[in-house]
Amino acid sequence: LQSRDVARPFRVVLMGRTMAGKSTLFEFLSGGDGARVGHGGQRTTRESQTGKILGQDIEIVDTPGVGAMDGDEDYAEAFGQVSQADLILWVATNEATQEQTGRALRQLADYGKPIMVALNCLRTVRDELDLLDLLEQPETIFGGDTLGNLKPIDRHLARAGGRYISATPIHAQAALLSMTGGLGPEESREMRQASRVDPLLTEIRAQKDKTAELRRAASIGDFIRSALLDAAGATAEAVQTVGSMLTASRGSRD
């Protein structure tokens, strides 16, 4: 307990699969210049990065992807941030289901951390026509099976007895461009409003105001919980190994 910094700011950890838009959202929230944003390549973020949400006493942490195609090292690095989190912001997409990230979602539910979902629209708005659609006909950009993309998240969390607090559709690229795209004040304001990121920020602030003190108390047990979960995982692997050895032994005997 002596190593626990109870005076630190409320901490939000971004998690999700590779290329979901975590780093784009991180750059916007922390007032970055977009340097951490990938350009269509897998596993751009390999190390966690911590910043502060602009104008808020809230820490934000960007982590590597935790999908099935992401590396084990990335997975371990991301989950190394979970024990210190007060809130998990799961960045999903409007173009792909979350089946590949089921293992991570179930493990998050085991940790008992509160989870919010940001359903990030991946359709680019760098093209002038797409940008016009976003500003004048946003549903043509945000359209899609929102409920369908949330169902796998619901299912995986439920298997471990968990659920998310809220789900907010956003356009992380548009939010970042509103700040770094060289737009005028009015255009920047319209772009930010169209990105729908402000309702997400409002929800994060509400969670901080409502749960910060409770999370500090609960976090005292996080280290014990983490150690027990690690031990349970190691035990399950050992059981599986012994079972395989027994099966092979029976096969040899037969």
Image (cartoon, helix red, strand yellow):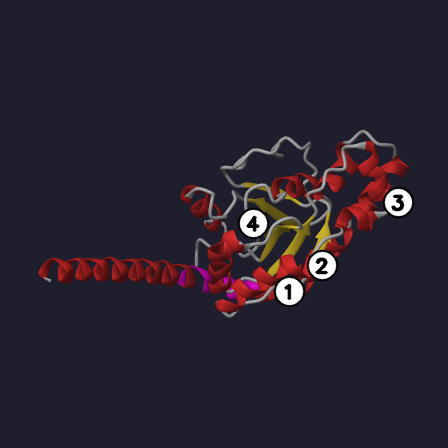
Which residue is nearer to you in this view: 248 or 70?
Answer: 248
Sooner in the amino-acid sequence: mark 1 or mark 3? 3
In this rendering, does residue 125 appear at all?
Answer: yes
Please name the residue that numbered disc 3 is placed on.
Answer: 136
Sooner in the amino-acid sequence: mark 3 or mark 2? 3
The reply to whether discs 2 and 1 touch (Cβ–Cβ < 8 Å) is yes
Residue at screen point 76% across, 52% down: 143
Q: Is residue 220 magenta?
A: yes
State the separation of the CA atoms marked 4 and 2: 19 Å
Residue that protrudes farthest toward the left in the picture: 253
Task: Provide residue 28's location: percent of width, then percent of height.
Answer: 70, 40
**Residue at disc 2, secondary structure:** helix
As drawn, is 84 to the left or to the right of 190? left
Please name the residue that numbered disc 4 is placed on.
Answer: 16
Residue 203's label in the rendered image is 2
State the separation of the CA atoms marked 2 and 1: 10 Å
